[in-house]
Image (cartoon, rainbow, N blue to C red):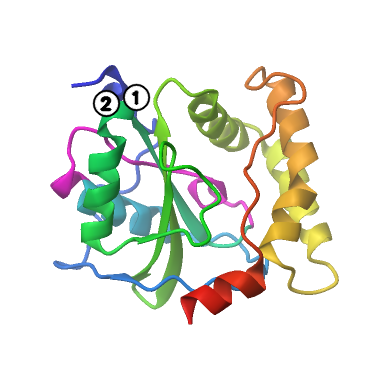
Amino acid sequence: MHSVAVLTDPHPSDADMTCPSDPPIGHYLRVPVVVHEADPHAPEAASCLIALIAASWPATPAEHVGSSAVAGLAGKNTIDLLLAADPTHIPAITETLLELGFQPQLPAAFPATRPMLWGAFRHGPTNYRVHVHVVPAASPEVAAMRGFRDALRADPLLRCRYAALKRAIVAGGPIDPVAFTKAKHDWIVATLGQLGLVSPGHPLYADDPPLDQSHKLAS
């Protein structure tokens, strides 16, 4: 087993959560960004998804990253999962995720060697959008995703600053996901640089597909 299997989220979700016996992965609908208050049930939903993936691919544990993995942090209420994988396993992991019902991101913003799949997952009354990032284990992006999550968990001031940034971006109303991502980019990269997680000038995100194009492809 690849050594990444032991690098798991140091803040696991409630082990006593109740998950559907056959959790469906629904169709992903891409919508304008609205910033919501933190959902305390998102980590439990993420744990259900992690267990679902592990039942089909136990060699590479998924872990919860992104804003919904940070208690009290406002965000889009999207569940982001990271699978830090042996690059030779990525095609098989991608196929496993497709068999579970996740869909390829269309148009693809990431290469097949670092895919992102998406889907929807209903947990209780909430239908969550889900992003599954399959990233080569040696990529600096893995440390950046984990490190940013852990720094936000540990630093209340950093959480407040990040939440304030997101609320300022959407102050005029819902915003296209591309614009939202780009508006956050420089602040996040600067923060990651201060944390020693990226080199100066290192891009954090690949460009996301335009909202209107995504809707046309999904319809």
Within the magenta stretch, is there residue 71? yes
Please give the name of the residue rendered at 79% of the width and 38% of the height, measured from the top-left corner: 186
- What span is in magenta? 54-74
Q: Which mark is residue 219?
A: none
Measured from the top left, where is residue 121 in percent x and y?
Answer: 35, 68
| Residue ID at (41%, 42%) | 112
Q: Compared to 147, does 173 lie above or below?
A: below
The percent coordinates of residue 212 (x first, y second) are 65, 74
**Which residue is tagged 2?**
5
Mark 1 to mark 2 CA distance (whole Å): 6 Å
Residue 204 vertical placement versus 170 (above, below): above
Query: Could you tell me the amino acid type at mark 1?
Result: Leu
Question: Where is mark 1, residue-wise?
Answer: 7
Q: In the rendered image, is residue 27 in sight? A: yes
Which quadrant holds the N terminus? top left
Q: Residue at x 61, y 71 (%)?
A: 213
Q: Nearer the viewer, residue 147 or 184?
A: 184
Contact between labelled residues 2 and 1, with CB atoms less than 8 Å apart: yes
At numbered mark 2, what does the secondary structure look like: helix, strand or loop? Answer: helix
Can the viewer see residue 132 in this picture? Answer: no
Give x and y (percent) for residue 148: 59, 33
Per the image, label 1 sits on a secondary structure element best described as loop
Q: Amino acid at mark 2?
A: Ala
Say few, some or many: other residues with alpha carbon within 10 Å of mark 1 (under 14 / 14 to 19 / 20 or more).
Answer: few
Q: Left or right: where does residue 133 sit relative to residue 121? A: right
